[in-house]
Image: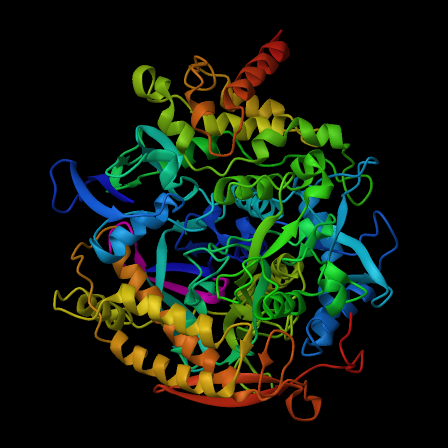
Amino acid sequence: MKITVEIQRFNPESDSKSYTQKYKVDAEPTDRLLTVLLDIKGTQDPTLGIRKSCAHGVCGSDAMVINGKERLACKTLIKDVAQGEGAVIRVEPLRNLPIQRDLMVDQHKFFKNYMHVKPYFMSSEEPKEKEFRQTPDERQKFEEGTKCILCVSCYSACPVIQEVNPNFLGPAAIVQAARFNDDSRDEGFEERLLQLDYPDGIWPCESRFECTRVCPRGIKITKTINLTKRKIQQHKS
Amino acid sequence: MHEYEALIVGAGGAGLYAALEASKTGKTAVLSKLFPIRSHTGAAQGGIGAALGNLEEDKPEWHAFDTVKGGDYLTDQNAAILLSEDAIQAVYELENKGLPFSRTPEGLIDQRRFGGHTRNFGEAPVRRACYAADRTGHMILQTLYQQCIKNDVVFFDEYYVLDVVMEGQRCSGLVTVNFSTGEIHIFKAKAVLFATGGFGRMFRITSNAYANTGDGQALLINRGVPLEDLEFYQFHPTGIRGLGILITEGVRGEGGILRNAKGERFMERYAPTLLDLAPRDMIARAIHSEIQELRGIKGDGSVDDFIYLDATHLGKEKIEAKLPDIAEFSRTYLGVDPADKPMPVHPTAHYAMGGIPTDLIGRVIFNSQGTTYEGLYAAGECACVSVHGANRLGTNSLVELIVYGRRAGQHMAQYVKGADFGIVPPDVGEPARARLAELQSQRNGPDPESLRQEMQRVMMENVGIYRNGENMAKAKNTLGEMRQVYTQIKANDPSKAFNTQVLEILELGHLLDLAYMMTACALNRQESRGAHAREDYPERDDKNWLKHTLAWLEDGKIRLDYKNVDISRWAPKPRKY
């Protein structure tokens, strides 16, 4: 089917502000949007800036705003976002981070916040046996957080960062902290508590569920944040 | 100029493990063209093999034997024994670093069956693959990156290596470009490890990421380093129809069955003992034969015909618990819930058994005697130890990353303590700078996209699952001509910063060099062994070909030599399953 892809463009070396460029393409309804974007890049406009790698939704490189919603371009089929001949798909870079070029944003702040929560396993002692024992139920308790691919979608969609507090730690960092806090083998809760329990830490979250809505891994982010808040409150009282 | 004692190129499983080890004593940095957690290790699904024996009796010796037999006896047996013994410790270390393995009811690391992994030298499938649902690679990558953060490993994200600084047989640094500025950065080092992964992107249908373009291998061949056993390339039997996205062997490990258009479990005819858990090369060929003999689902024998991977009898609960990502890929890309309907699949280009030749501690080898360079290491898919021989078993790629990435890193840590920095001339970056300037000289040149597509077509049609001399000779000529055309390519994008087009053109050059070499090596090997199946030489020929190929690219010509295979433990036998 013939569709139009409207892409927000910006090249810091030649543009003073972003603008929209339209490309007409012939695509199959089952094509991945990423394939269509790369086809545009390969045959119409090689200057189009885009990050990509695995192309099937596990590396987290190609999150962008598609028809107003954060999605992975490789996990979005044309039929998901364009209905019928002549449909228009609008593609923009992620929000809440500086644009580097076209669909690429500067993710340093996102990763800085991620690293801030000490997102790594901490244990003071060696396991008694070769492995730490953990039952399937204990393992299941932190399943949600292990699915995160750090694609930045939730950070981009967060209305609190956008409207209330640009310094908010953001959803992904909290999910990563929870992944370890809820792991029966881990002993880093108190250290991580200090990284979450401050005004720009976990508390700005207003449970607006945008993060949960856009997460391409289906993580119940808002719920995880609320459970973490409760865990901190219980610990303090 | 940056100065680090140890430099790691590539931030997948092998690179990150090596970095963790090297940074214990040496000032270490990791250079990666991707953000580290985007590396392709994260796409590995089914498991990591180790004879823990958590569910049934298992021994490293059995694992080693399976690896050797799976590799059709081209595996170096000393390397396979080391692999299977170290695998146990490596898996426990990963668990101790927090890796969230799936668990048995007793709380131990759970294990599942995988292709070619057997008990007692081939009797029946064994539960050896340790796994974290179907996200084992993701968890390994995450865990190692987390540990690197904990240990303050230095990262240069989105730096792309353009050249390797060699002083004779010694590596003393790297020339790189910073993607965010387009500026050249020179790194001086005592030791450099390449862990840059595979090159599946030379094929039209592949499970590999866009990033898998063989950069490390190609950079080194341009510095006179040979590559080993390049002719052995694995097609994974079950890629999503048309897209090539991997559907893990873990589906069959959990009981999934391959069926043709008649609904037959056709592996009964090809591998009566192991059936759907036979090694990948045999299953890929079996699928190919079923399609050729018009028993594919379409039944027309066409290149896009396919067969079914049936997991419906496993039930929704088991699929969602053990194979959740597969279920989601299937729903997203095929519109099929694997609990309700079988998944349409066909083979997909997946893994390079060959690569940069190394010894058992990751040092790069430069001749048939096994002499090594100083300060130059390789590990992971880009390397060839050789543990995979002519065909890799499922899960052994992750095992190799961890075992040999760790060993190389440990040796680097020791080596840099006693070594001095070499000499890096101040103008060492000039050829790379000139190359970039030439690429961006804004003259007209051939179109890179059509060249890329043509390469992918030529490789898929002529150097795929089945090969023959006539077609490969033609393909080699075509690829040689394409390499000439390539030299005239120009980038239309004049920008310095964030120039993805320039990187993609460089990557295409790497793929073309490797495709050309692979075709030459495959043409040269006149036998069928493992993944290398010649229609004109259908038998394995141990008398003439039980040897590793070493290949050099010199002024556009291929030079070949050979290296002995370690067969010190098991005498080669016919390979039946």
Please provide percent x and percent y for residue B4: 43, 59
Please provide percent x and percent y for residue B129: 73, 52
Of B453 and A61, which appears nearest the observer? B453
Of B221 and A156, which appears nearest the observer? A156
Q: Which residues are magenta?
A: B177-199
- Tell whether position B392 is magenta: no
Please provide percent x and percent y for residue A73: 37, 41
Relative placement, left or right, of B319 versus B473 is right
At x 80%, y 66%, the residue is B272
At x 24%, y 56%, the residue is B182
User: What quarter of the picture does the N terminus of chain B occupy?
Assistant: bottom left
> Where B173 falls versus B169 (above or below)?
above
Relative placement, left or right, of B216 versus B450 is right
Relative placement, left or right, of B388 versus B81 is left
- Tell whether position B188 is magenta: yes
At x 37%, y 25%, the residue is A157
| Quadrant position of residue B431 | bottom left
Please provide percent x and percent y for residue B428: 29, 72
Inspect this view and state whether residue B337 appears: yes
Relative placement, left or right, of B45 versus B503 is right
Of B573 and B193, which appears nearest the observer? B573
